[in-house]
């Protein structure tokens, strides 16, 4: 058993160690409880060990804190004075997950808690059910549909694009303030003119942000946010398309070529290189980032810059520091790829969709029963299904 560490000077709280006089033992033992704790991961997960989990026990009335490391099987035994406690466990666990036909070891975050819990009696058995999430956790691109569809006549239809974001953590999160951007660089070009600073930031040509005051759009673990070009039932005009009337937000460019669906809130448009409307690159030459800036006004002021072309035209652009980026997906065409738009730390490779009516969709790594955890290794070739079926069709 690993030693239980006490953060507070327990003698001041009246807790007497076994080294005290035998005359006091009976009096102390009557108010002490031996607690056996067991932390369990979701049944669908094959756990190797729980060596990385830390236990914190807080006495609600005195504020005293006790801490310990759990055993590899998620157990621990400790003794505390009877009372009301907040008990929490957090840290990393090692698990086995399927990776194609193989199984690999992986680390996941686990959290478990019990608040206002009464510890009473000589012996107490406590089981905590843990929730797991990716180490990176947080927000991810779940699906990106940029290719557009094809009408029965064979004519291209490009107004049904969408992005789906997912809360891949085990905690309630808020979508307020999340921004999506399209990288300026095309991955089919032989040289990225921004390459010298690729480890610092991504130069982008759009910035659209989810509105809200901070807690207006709560998203449960595993929940999604759907961002669309036009929140319409596109199957009316094209039976090969999708119905996007259940979208959460749409990007609207306030241009005569665009259509605003009043029932669906608009993203905040901060910047777009297009003088008319923005449509994600239908060939898949561009890459996309998801980021969060706590103060957008300051962010825009600090990261705006101008570029003068050889013809004397001034072009305004923005750079997004890599440390603000929550997720990034590099796109290209396998036979045409020439240079990266994103740092290897953001995305090691790229994924693609080169068929009408298909998307790139993130792979499920673990099914927890009530939700799934999506794969996130910062390698789009490994994390995404290319030419995937559109989830919005179902």
Image: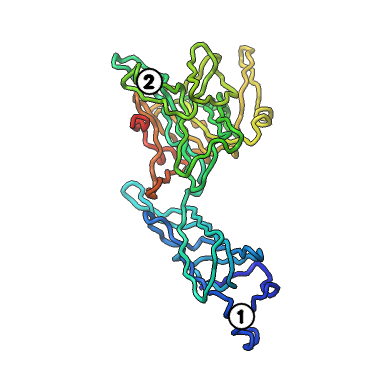
Residue 71 point in image, percent of width and height: 48, 67
Residue 126 point in image, percent of width and height: 48, 66
> Which of the labelled discs sits on residue 234, or is there none?
2
Report the residue at 52% width, 74% height from top: 121
Most foreground residue, 308 or 33: 33
Q: Quadrant of the C terminus?
A: top left
Q: Secondary structure at mark 2?
A: loop
Residue 327 in sight here: yes
Residue lying furthest bottom in this view? 23
Residue 81 point in image, percent of width and height: 59, 73
Report the residue at 56% width, 21% height from top: 272
> Which of the labelled discs sits on residue 206, or is there none?
none
Camera-nearest label, 2 or 1: 1
Q: Secondary structure at mark 1?
A: helix
- Labels 2 and 1 touching (C-beta < 8 A): no
219 left or right, relative to 384:
right
Most foreground residue, 108 or 260: 260
Q: Residues within 10 Å of mark 2 (few under 14, many from 20)?
A: some
Q: Residues within 10 Å of mark 1 (few under 14, many from 20)?
A: some
Residue lying furthest right in this view? 12
Residue at image mark 1? 28
Report the residue at 43% width, 53% height from top: 106
Most foreground residue, 310 or 74: 74
């Amino acid at each position: 058993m690993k030693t239980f560490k006490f953060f507070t000077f327990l003698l001041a709280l009246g807790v007497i160690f076994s080294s005290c006089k035998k005359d006091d033992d009976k009096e102390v033992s009557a108010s002490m409880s031996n607690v056996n704790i067991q932390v369990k991961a979701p049944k669908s997960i094959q756990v190797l060990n729980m060596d990385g989990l830390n236990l914190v026990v807080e006495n609600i009335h005195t504020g005293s804190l006790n801490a310990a490391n759990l055993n590899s099987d998620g157990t621990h035994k400790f003794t505390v004075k009877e009372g009301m406690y907040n008990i929490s466990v957090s840290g990393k666990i090692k698990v086995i997950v399927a990776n194609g036909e193989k199984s690999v070891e992986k680390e996941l975050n686990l959290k478990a808690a019990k608040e206002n819990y009464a510890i009473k009696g000589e012996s107490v058995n406590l089981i905590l059910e843990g929730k797991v999430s990716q180490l990176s956790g947080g927000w991810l691109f779940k699906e990106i549909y940029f290719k557009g569809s094809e009408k029965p006549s064979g004519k291209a239809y490009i107004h049904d694009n969408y992005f789906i974001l997912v809360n891949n953590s085990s905690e309630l999160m808020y979508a307020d303030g999340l921004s999506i951007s399209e990288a300026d660089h095309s991955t089919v070009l032989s040289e990225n003119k921004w390459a010298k600073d690729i480890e610092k930031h991504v130069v982008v040509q759009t910035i659209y942000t989810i509105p809200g005051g901070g807690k207006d759009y709560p998203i449960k673990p595993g929940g999604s946010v759907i961002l669309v070009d036009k929140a319409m039932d596109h199957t009316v005009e094209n039976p090969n398309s999708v119905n996007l009337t259940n979208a959460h937000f749409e990007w609207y460019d306030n241009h005569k070529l665009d259509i605003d669906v009043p029932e669906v809130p608009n993203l905040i448009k901060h910047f777009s290189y297009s003088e008319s409307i923005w449509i994600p690159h239908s060939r898949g030459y561009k890459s996309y980032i998801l980021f969060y800036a706590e103060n957008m006004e300051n962010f825009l002021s600090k990261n705006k810059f101008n570029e003068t072309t050889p013809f004397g035209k001034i072009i305004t652009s923005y750079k997004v520091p890599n440390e603000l980026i929550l997720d990034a997906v590099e796109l290209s065409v396998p036979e045409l790829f020439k240079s990266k738009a994103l740092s290897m730390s953001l995305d090691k490779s790229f994924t693609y969709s080169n068929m009408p009516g298909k998307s790139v969709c993130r792979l499920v790594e673990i099914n927890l029963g009530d939700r799934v955890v999506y794969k996130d290794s910062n390698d789009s070739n490994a994390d995404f299904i290319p030419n995937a079926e559109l989830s919005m069709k179902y």
